[in-house]
Amino acid sequence: MELDHYFTPILYVSMKDLKNVFRHIEKELKRSSWFDDGWEIYNRGVYMQLYKINWHNQNQGGIHFETFIEPREIKQKAFPICMHAEEDCPSQDEFIQQFLALEGDHIKSWKGYQLGNGYSICKRTLPLNYKNLEQRLMEEFNRLRQLEAGIEETLQRVEY
């Protein structure tokens, strides 16, 4: 039985372990050279949002990049990382339409990303591999950050 532990370690990862992973990712993001340029993190243990202060996400219902690993994701051995433009996003439908016109082809060029529907702009489902989890999440958040200029430009268009 002990051998099974080595072949399927993710089955034995506790929520406490995952909360520690998320805390470490938060620390690493905050140490990034770009973070002090108006970025914020909402970290609720095994659920995280990364966003800029002007993205109307003060109540976690605006524009943000998001990931979470809850019991369902552990059972499925996969978890999402995505971009949302939720109900607090100004002119939400117009924002989504204009943003996808601007950045949709860029997003589609990324391996594994799919355009969403409704408030879900895009999503990638990653295999839950505890061994390189922190590195993968840092890479994906940095990839999504490439959308910052497009988000800012689209917000300027719909807010004025």
Image: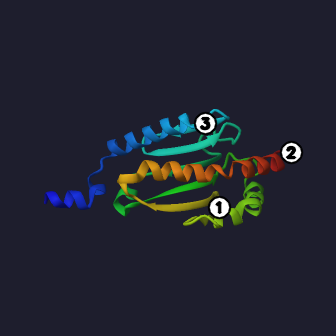
Q: Which mark is residue 33?
A: 3
Q: Which residue is mark 2?
A: 160
The residue carrying pointer 2 sits among few (fewer than 14), some (14 to 19) or many (20 or more) residues within 10 Å by Cα, namely few
Q: Identify whether 159 is placed above or below 140.
A: above
- The extreme left residue here reads 1
How far across and down, in percent of the image, does residue 24 sit? 43, 38
Does the residue at mark 1 contact the one at mark 2 (Cβ under 8 Å)? no
Q: If you read the primary sequence from the N terminus, does the residue marked by circle 1 or circle 3 appear first?
A: 3
Q: Quadrant of the C terminus?
A: top right
- The extreme front residue here reads 33
**Foreground: disc 3 or disc 2:** 3
The residue carrying pointer 1 sits among few (fewer than 14), some (14 to 19) or many (20 or more) residues within 10 Å by Cα, namely few
Residue type beneath disc 1: Gly
The residue drawn where x is 40% and y is 53% is 132
Q: If you read the primary sequence from the N terminus, does the residue marked by circle 1 or circle 2 appear first?
A: 1
Q: Which mark is residue 86?
A: none
Q: Tell me the distance, in whole angstroms, between the alpha carbons under discs 1 and 3.
A: 33 Å
**Foreground: disc 1 or disc 3:** 3
How far across and down, in percent of the image, does residue 136 sit? 47, 53
Q: Tell me the distance, in whole angstroms, between the alpha carbons under discs 3 and 2.
A: 30 Å
Q: Which mark is residue 118?
A: 1
Left or right for 51, reference 79:
right
How far across and down, in percent of the image, does residue 28 sit? 50, 38
Q: If you read the primary sequence from the N terminus, does the residue marked by circle 3 or circle 2 appear first?
A: 3
How far across and down, in percent of the image, does residue 125 sit? 49, 62
Q: Identify whether 70 is placed above or below 102.
A: above
Q: Tell me the distance, in whole angstroms, between the alpha carbons under discs 1 and 2.
A: 23 Å
Label 2: element kind: loop
